[in-house]
Image (cartoon, helix red, strand yellow):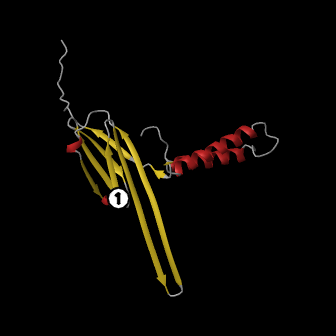
Amino acid sequence: MTGLIPAEELKKLQKRMNRLMEDLGLTDLESRYLEEMQHMQQRMGDLMEEVETPKIEKDSLAPLADVRETDEALIVTMDLPGVSKQDVDISITDDELRVVAERKTETEVTEKDFHKRERTYKRFERSVALPVSIKVEETKARLAEGVLEITLPKESITSRKRISID
């Protein structure tokens, strides 16, 4: 995705804005621009929360995904860290690919005077619009090292022909 600002750059910008407010004396109640600067600071804080918090829809995380198109197929690559292949459900409709996955982990630590058990549950859900017709029967998926790759062969293969200009 283009146009996104990395979180660390936003943090640096927020710190610079705070220093600027202090240097200019805009922390005083008499300052005529205090309200606007405070509003800008609040908005920067809100932006930082949006950047640092993954997108959650209906208690599900939307995993990062890339879609590439070749002449023969669409290739969708999706990050599913810590998910086993038996916990992934892939479905295709006429114009949409849908991936739902669950990650369940349970850890138990027992030491001399200490006992701890933790359970975590994450649900991943992502839908991708399909811009072309797909051969559903020939679709293949592979999950390796937390990355799901789905190859969706196109119904009609696009051939490219070079057109010369007269």
Query: Which residue of the protein is positioned furthest toward the top in this rendering?
Result: 166
Q: Which residue is mark 1?
A: 87
What residue is rendered at 49% in x and 75% in y? Answer: 117
- Quarter of the figure that contains the C terminus: top left
What residue is rendered at 61% in x and 46% in y? Answer: 46
Which amino acid, mark 1? Answer: Asp
Relative height, residue 70 to residue 99 (above, below): above
What residue is rendered at 49% in x and 71% in y? Answer: 118
Question: Where is residue 62 shown, x and y percent of the image?
Answer: 44, 48
What residue is rendered at 20% in x and 37% in y? Answer: 72
Q: Classify residue 97 by image quadrant.
A: top left
Question: Where is residue 78 shown, x and y percent of the image?
Answer: 35, 49
Left or right side of 18 for 60: left
Question: Where is residue 107 shown, x and y percent of the image?
Answer: 44, 73
Residue 63: tell me if it is visible: no
Relative height, residue 101 to residue 118 (above, below): above
Q: Is 68 in front, or is 11?
A: 68
